[in-house]
Amino acid sequence: MANEIHQKTARSLDKVTTDYVQKPKSLSELHAGIISGKTKATELANSYYERIAEINPALNVYLSLTRERALETAGRIDELAAKGDVLPVLAGVPVGIKDVLVAKGAPATAGSKMLSGYHPPYDATSVAKLEAAGAVILGKLNCDEFAMGSSNENSAYGPVKNPVNVERVPGGSSGGSAAAVAADMAVATLGTDTGGSIRQPASFCGVGGVLPTYGRVSRYGLIAFASSLDRVGPFAANVRDAATLLSVIAGYDTQDATSSRRPVDDYAAESDKSVKGLRVGVPAEYFGEGLDPEIRESIERGIDHLRAAGAEIKQVSLPTTQYAVPTYYLVATAEASANLARFDGVRYGYRAEGAETLAAMYSRSRDEGFGAEVKRRIMLGTYALSAGYYDAYYRKAQQVRRLLAEEFLTVFGEVDVIATPTSPIPPFKLGEKTDDPLAMYLADIYTVTASLAGICGVTVPSGATQSGLPIGMQILASHFNEGTAFRAARAVEAAQG
């Protein structure tokens, strides 16, 4: 069954720091094993389903499983391997998909009651590309409702727990995607990033995450939050695997008018290149007030590793950064208000019972179907777009967005990449910020800038706090220069051992 979820008794959670985090398998190791016949794709898929059955009740990572589809794909891979045929790059690799991306026959809830029971009749382009490359789709992953959140506590189906420390959030909105890789419940996953929803959970869970350039990966089949900001990207345990995944899902799509026709690079090969002579910018605005001291020390150590590897370190300035959070939360909420207007209880999804008029049915369906955070953002966006306020809020935010993008372009005339912390704080406790939305929004300060500018970036693990909480380093590069970002991230990863 597509929506199969095992319900077994979870292990005791008496210990806060758990053994859920496992050393993950690399794509190259899996590929070599399947080619040689030492590893069977069907056996590998079943072993992941056993692990999901064991620990998903404790972590709440998967919302639904696609076992029948997964084993069918794995069986085809085993047949090809037995005949000695050339296998595609992701042959037999178990992957998970964030539940805002549609997959034929599987539920697509977007973490919301509003879409409970919706089974889309088609695959998202990114999902189809993964499967065409041999990937085995295990199931759909939990996320903040309609990708709105920074902690994965906004899901209508319960929060995801951080595998490193189950009292902490995994980050959001792609918390399930990051946690699945960290807990070895998938070798790789897909997530989406609107204002940091790949990079921040990757940082919080200690894995790699990629923000592609806007237009680099098709958004066809993505349940929209903010159309000028939403992007699909991969999570993986290491930089090279993340680069391989991006090469698979990137490229032009006739079904997405915003996708780029630029050729797709071999990002894995780009990541192998030396950083000697690479110009690395360090913006003062990302190391100011509010940055946790342990994170500052870790990121500065990562920058020192780049210097030792032959990179040239240069201080740069991005002064418009101070306006990024309010700008983002005006643009994103305005677009959310427009995109979510389609969920009205008429065509699909949740419909309230007992309404006596059409207006009452609309109102009650949306009130009961949407969670508190989604309703908050719809109201903010509707207000910013309303008569008398459009110029003061939405138009002004778009003007500041342009200033921010131009500022990045100027800085990228001086440096090849920019190195920053991914988050100003380590993973916080579940429930710690749910009553203070503003504090939650402010934690996005280092990620929303790249989102507004449309540039690309990679988050790579960069050590941990004294209490063992992961720290992530963000490497930003100019439009369509993902390969350069991978080079720098790979050098940081290598220095971490």
Image: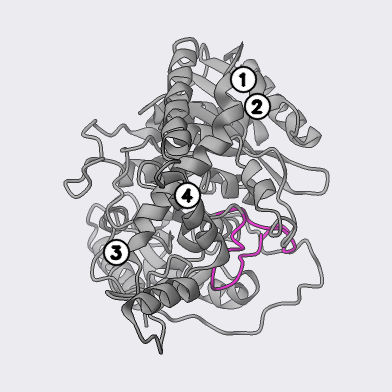
Is 226 positioned to the left or the right of 164 in the image?
Answer: left
**Marks 4/3: CA distance?**
52 Å
Q: Quadrant of the C terminus?
A: top right
Q: Nearer the viewer, mark 4 or mark 3?
A: 4
What residue do we see at 46% from left, 16% from top? Answer: 412
Q: Residue at x 16, y 46 (%)?
A: 254
Residue drawn at 38 percent across, 71 percent down: 42
- Say above or below: 409 vs 248: above
Q: Amino acid at mark 2?
A: Tyr
Given residues 354 and 268, the one toward you in this image is 354
Q: Position of residue 52 (x, y in %)?
A: 54, 72
Calculate the distance from the C-alpha at mark 1 to the C-alpha at mark 3.
47 Å
Q: Which residue is mark 1?
A: 283
Q: Residues within 10 Å of mark 4 (few under 14, many from 20)?
A: some
* Mark 2–mark 1 CB contact (< 8 Å): yes
User: Which residue is labeled 2 in the image?
Assistant: 286
Q: Which residue is mark 4?
A: 383
Q: In the depicted view, which residue is nearer to us: 31 or 456?
A: 456
First-in-chain label (2 vs 3): 3
**Residue 160 lies in the magenta stretch:** yes
The alpha-carbon separation of the residues under discs 2 and 1 comes to 6 Å
Q: From the image, tell me which residue sits under label 3.
A: 77
What residue type is disc 1 on?
Answer: Pro
